[in-house]
Amino acid sequence: MTPADAAPESEHGNKVGDEVAVMATVLKRVTKDRVSVSIPGLPHSVIDPATRLTRGQQMELSGDVTRIDGDKVTVSLGPMVTVDLDKVRVVQSRVPPKRRTVRM
């Protein structure tokens, strides 16, 4: 693999394409199937149809890393969310496909 083929990587080992989890705190229930959550510093509204979360509970949101910029990472959680690198946990690391070589 050449350096151009490699995904950008942070000093913590996170790579673009990794599936990561971000912890969010429930702020309030907006409607019967939607709650407002705070993702470290950012308020968002997410769908919660199955469980009945209450104010102050923690929930884990997962998505793919789309960009790494120093100590910040952008995660696709529906909308793109940029958080500090130390606020994410790797769920599954992206492994690039192996190239097949032609045998003659």
Image (spheres, rainbow, N blue to C red):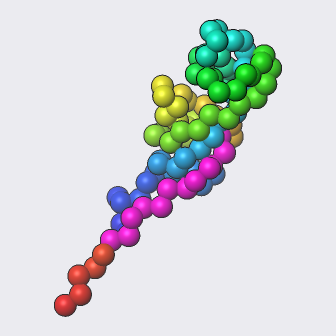
Q: Nearer the viewer, residue 73 or 79?
A: 79
First to last magenta residue range: 88-99
Query: What is the quadrant of residue 47 in the picture?
Result: top right
Q: Is residue 28 magenta?
A: no
Q: Is residue 69 visible?
A: no
User: Residue at the front extreme?
Assistant: 50
Q: Position of residue 93 (x, y in %)?
A: 55, 56
Q: Looking at the image, which residue sits at the far right?
A: 56
Which residue appears farthest toward the top when viewing the image?
30
Q: Is residue 61 visible?
A: yes
Residue 59, placed above or below residue 17: above
Which quarter of the rendered picture does the N terminus lie within? bottom left
The one nearer the camera, 36 or 70, is 36
Classify residue 104 as left or right of residue 14: left
Residue 82's place in the image compared with 102, above or below, is above
Q: In front: 48, or 17?
A: 48
The residue at 53%/39% (across/down) is: 63
Q: How many marks?
A: 0
- Is residue 97 highlighted in magenta? yes
48 horizontally vs 99: left or right: right
- What residue lies at 52% left-to-right and 35% top-to-bottom? 75
Q: Residue at x 70, y 26 (%)?
A: 51
